[in-house]
Amino acid sequence: MTLKQFNTLRSIVAFLVAMVVALSVLRENFFWPVVTVAVAVLVMLFLRRRVKEVIADERDLAVGGTAAMWSIKIFSIAAIIILFVFYAQGKENTAFRTMAETLAYTTCALMLLYSSIFTFLRRRGTK
């Protein structure tokens, strides 16, 4: 299979997953979206193994890593600014304080997860 065929099939699978999830959520059935996503992941893994061309090279992976690092940094800074704005409004409305605390914990979890994965991959690569 060529890379162009793979990308076309990937778009079709994404469209079908989106359609099934949207219809299932409208009908308040949450079982089928989980099954659909699981099947789609398996289908994509199968299709990816059949591609004969190079999907991504080292440069693409390096650019992706840099983009992920900058995304986490920018998101964390923006989340902290929004967190302080919500926390300042928390005296008037307790919902803002709850949102601020949720945002704080989520941002901390994201940074801890990124640091843990980065440390793990760096150690694994040096051995």
Image (cartoon, helix red, strand yellow):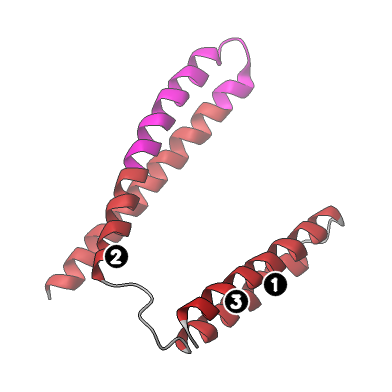
> Is 113 drawn above or below residue 107 in the view shown?
below
State the image quarter where residue 22 is shown.
bottom right
Cα distance in 3D space between marks 2 and 3: 22 Å
Mark 2–mark 3 contact, CB under 8 Å? no
Q: Residue type at mark 1: give it.
A: Thr
**Horizontal arrangement in the rendering, residue 83 relative to residue 126 (left or right):** right
> Is 44 drawn above or below residue 95 in the view shown?
below
Q: Nearer the viewer, mark 2 or mark 3?
A: 3
Residue located at (47% from left, 84% from top): 2
Which corner quadrant holds the C terminus?
Answer: bottom left
Residue located at (59% from left, 82% from top): 43
Q: Which mark is residue 36?
A: 1
Residue where numbered disc 2 is placed:
61
- Near mark 3 (Cα within 10 A), the count class, few <14, some 14-19 or many ≥20, is some
State the image quarter where residue 29 is shown.
bottom right
Residue where numbered disc 3 is placed:
9
Residue 108 locus on image (x, y percent): 38, 41
Kind of element beneath mark 2: helix
